[in-house]
Image: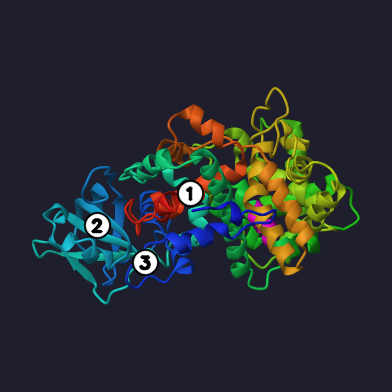
Amino acid sequence: MDIEQLMNDLFSDGYREVLSACSVREPGDEGYEAAERKIPESLVRCIWFDRMFAEDGLETVDGTPVTIASPGRWNVEAGPDFRDAEISFAPLTSTRGDIEVHVRASHWRRHGHHEDPGYDNVVLHVALFVDTPDKHVKTSAGKKVPQFELKDIIQGEPLELLDSIDIGAYPGAAKNITKRCRELLTRRKNADTWLGRFLDLAGDERVIARSRRLEESLAGRTLDRALYEGMMEALGYKANKEQFKELARNVGLDDIRRLVPPDVPEEDGALTIQALLFGMAGLLPADLPESTDPETEEYVDTLRTLWGQMKSNLKQKPMEADAWSFSGVRPTNFPVRRIAGASYILASHLETGLVRALLGAIESTAGKKSRVGFRALEKLFTQPGRGYWAQHCTFGGKPMPRPMSLVGKERATAIVLNIVLPLLLLHARREEDIALERKLHAMYASHGKMAGNSVTRFMRGVLFRDEDHAVEIIKTARRQQGLYQLFRDCCDNAEATCRTCFFARAIAE
């Protein structure tokens, strides 16, 4: 397929056109808009394995109380998704067996598990959506297997989790790939140029899709509020993503603007925001050991005083301190330091608003190279070590030998790529501001590639001859994002196979 005609200097819908033209239509297929909302089975496996759901009062579909002692061992071979899980069904003692996971409960029969003896040891069928009236599924031996639905108990929306979870880092992700597309590329004239262009289109689609989901989820929120909540979520990384989302919901942008005096110096404003966020996060220490250093004592006393003045003006209850995860997190990325970084970002733009600041940064770089404009956006989120947290990772902990950034360039870049660009694209299209969209697209297209991860490494193995070949083509963040889009729509799509893959058909046509 000739895709040159689909390229332009705006965010192109060319990827969707290729997908629509080259998709194999199955009975009941509802087209791209439905396909876009399909959730990969591997995401549901990740949700189950890492227990990304509320675990209080769990019940099977038939109302039986259930306790999950162990989600099981990830199975990368044929057969059920997890082995040796330990599940308790009240009032019986625990049972050990296999777990099978699907997006929809109807896939148990659709995939033929009811006739396959390899699934006779399944003790629980886990589905994101139970789309059948059946309270149980049956094995080939006729045994009834309880069903467990995740839909109403997961921590976050599925599509949001899909954007944030590194699915490729889990065992067995996209394990049945034949690499047919690489073989087809070897037969295509000017294959490298064509592939690069296609990944450009796929990278555009990743931003467009995020912008579309943002518009659907606004529900009366302002863009400033959506940006604040998205920034906070991004600062949580994987370990504290949901906690930061909850904190941003409990302490809204309006609360911060209402409780922080508008005419205070920036440092004082940041300190007030820290007291507000630490207090609501449940992370403000109630007591300090007698050996605490004077700097920490003075800082914590100030925070306590400020928090005492504000907490009665908030509707929500503070979070529990043990809700936050410090285990497995690098000390410089501890949530207390990220909250401090957020406080400085917010204090710098509390009056004008972050969206206006972003638009101002773009305007100030008019006529300059696009990379300069992208760096100006990054700068709004990059925070060097400042104040108490410049050399501390915990309240009263041993100071680091030198100041460390509160929000580094890599995290700031991720915020701009994943949150700012989709949000500003939505703003540009709402305002019919073609010039702004053109600037945003030029900045996106010019940004160099970022550090890779398991998904980009996986896709490199699928598409390219070797590492040198991959480096030659994947030169920009836009093309990296294109790899993510392809992984999601093709290699990690439970509804597709290499035989029906639209990308393979696009190569061949």
Position in image of residue 208 (x %, y %):
60, 59
Q: Amino acid at mark 1?
A: Ile
Q: Which residues are magenta?
A: 226-231
Q: CA distance from mark 3 to mark 2?
A: 42 Å
Q: Residues within 10 Å of mark 1 (few under 14, many from 20)?
A: some
Residue located farthest toward the bottom when viewing the structure as drawn: 133
Pick whichever of labels 2 and 1 is earlier in the sequence: 2
Q: Upstream in the sequence, badge 1 or badge 3? A: 3
Residue at 26% over, 68% down: 64
Residue 25 is marked as 3
Q: Residue 350: x percent and y percent?
A: 81, 56
Query: In this orientation, does residue 12 appear?
Result: yes
Q: Name which of mark 3 and mark 2 comes first in the sequence.
A: 3
Task: Indicate yes or no whether the magenta region holds residue 14.
Answer: no
Q: Residue furthest front?
A: 189
Q: Position of residue 338 (x, y in %)?
A: 66, 43
Q: Secondary structure at mark 3?
A: loop
Residue marked by disc 2: 88
- Residue at label 1? 165
